Amino acid sequence: MSQEMRSWELWGISEADWNDGWRRTLQFAIEAAFADGKAAIGEGKPVQIEVRKRSDNAVHDYRVVG
């Protein structure tokens, strides 16, 4: 029986970085930033987007803070 991989393992991100909001795609980083449910539907909020280069290829990690 194989052990199921956790989300952060599937994306190759450390558990600490995953818990800090880093994701492999901008879409998932935005979803992580709004996961707490504090923003009302239709409500906007300013955010800061951080991008971290992972290799010479077009592979990056993203984090949305706001």
Image (cartoon, rainbow, N blue to C red):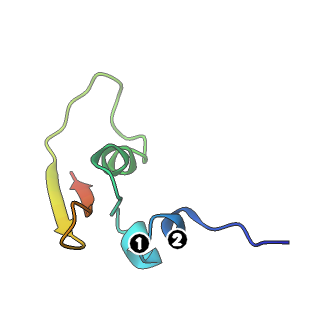
Q: Quadrant of residue 43?
A: top left
Of the pair 3 and 28, the residue shown nearer to us: 3
Percent x, y of residue 56: 18, 72
Left or right: 41, with 45 as reference point = right
Q: Is residue 5 above or below residue 39?
A: below
Q: Pinpoint residue 47: horizontal percent, then vertical percent.
A: 16, 47
When the figure is inspected, residue 29 is found, relative to residue 44, above or below; the finding is below
**Residue behind mark 1:** 13
State the image quarter where residue 34 is shown.
Answer: top left
Badge 1: residue crowd in 10 Å (few <14, some 14–19, many ≥20): some
Name the mark on residue 9. 2
Q: Horizontal and vertical percent for residue 52?
A: 19, 68
**CA separation, marks 2 and 1?**
6 Å
Label 1: state its secondary structure: loop
At horizontal 20% and vertical 31% (from top left) the residue drawn is 44
Q: Residue at x 38, y 44 (%)?
A: 31
Check disc 2: other Cα within 10 Å, few if <14, some if 14-19, many if 20+: few
Name the residue: 18% across, 37% down: 45
